[in-house]
Image (cartoon, rainbow, N blue to C red):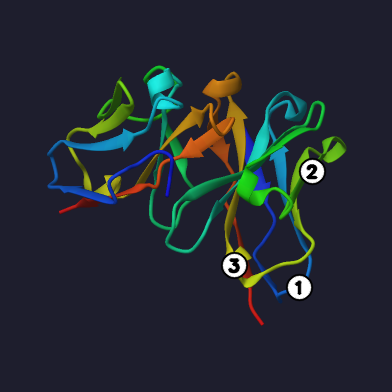
Amino acid sequence: QSVLTQPPSVSGAPGQRVTISCTGSSSNIGARYDVHWYQQLPGAAPKLLIYGNSNRASGVPDRFSDSKSGTSASLAITGLQAEDEGDYYCQSYDSSLSGSVFGGGTKLTVL
Amino acid sequence: EVQLVQSGAEVKKPGESLQISCKASGYSFTSYWIGWVRQMPGKGLEWMAIIYPGDSDTRYTPSFQGQVTISVDKSISTAYLQWTILKASDSAMYYCARMSGAAASRFIDYWGQGTLVTVSS
């Protein structure tokens, strides 16, 4: 059971907008620790998408954005493309564990 | 260009020992934390351990403490992950990862290509 909870799967048609939630607690997201997002395409290593205060990693299109409220964070993908299909992970710091934690991951399917 | 190049896939038997490596290039090796992330087949990412090559300060996720050893050789900019007694449940993909950012804001900005470890009798 991950400290950060993500939905197992989301889906959307090409061109649509999808969001992926990452729900934590008062010892991680709720404590205002940064949330970072990673993309893992099939058969590949994970790749940094968004870090810190909504900073997109180099080469990441502005179709990807994030937001945070209370003990939750979200990744939004607009103009969905077939190449976006893969797994997405959130990551933050947890003060109770004194270390970084990943969410369980969300599989994005482009219909 | 920052690169993390990991050693190749391994097939081992239960009870054997193993060390996998991650050679870093393109940046000051001693100035960034580097760590290992496990991904079991069909599962998510798990932090295992991180180390600061500058002073070898090491942190383990509790579930991996005592199960693996992380180390570095600064002279060749290489990080290692070692098992003394492998179990079938250690079969997984292992990624090395460079971390950026300060303390509780750290994130992984570069990943290795992964090393697949298979433990089977």
What residue is at 56 percent from the left and 36 percent from the top?
Answer: B110
Q: Residue furthest bottom?
A: B121
Which of pointers 2 and 1 indicates the residue nearer the eye?
1
User: Looking at the picture, which amino acid does disc 1 mark?
Assistant: Gly
Q: Amino acid at mark 2?
A: Ser
Is the C-beta separation of discs 2 and 3 under 8 Å?
A: no
Mark 2: secondary structure: strand
How far from the left and from the top, in percent, is residue A80?
19, 40
Q: Position of residue B29 (x, y in %)?
A: 74, 30
Q: Position of residue A33 (x, y in %)?
A: 46, 21
Is residue A29 or residue A44 the one in the foreground? A29
Tag 3 and tag 1, C-beta contact below 8 Å: no
Classify residue A39 as left or right of residue A20.
right
Residue at the spot of label 1: B15
Q: Is residue A2 above or below residue B55?
A: below
Say what amino acid the circle numbered 3 marks: Ser
Residue at image mark 2: B71
Is residue B61 among the parts visible in the rendering? yes
Give the class, few, some or many, for how many residues have Cα within 10 Å of label 2's Cα (few <14, many ≥20): many
The quadrant holding residue B77 is top right
Q: Earlier in the sequence, mark 2 or mark 3?
A: 2
State the quadrant of the C terminus of chain B: bottom right
Q: Is residue B54 left or right of residue B2?
A: right
Residue A64, compared with residue B90, is above or below; it is above
Gap between marks 2 and 3 measured at Cα:
22 Å
- Indicate the secondary structure of the residue bearing disc 3: helix
**Could one spot residue B1 in this view of the protein?**
no
Mark nearer the N terminus (2 vs 1) = 1
Residue corresponding to mark 3: B89
Residue at horizontal 64%, vertical 65%? Answer: B9
Relative to A59, say whether A11 is above or below.
below
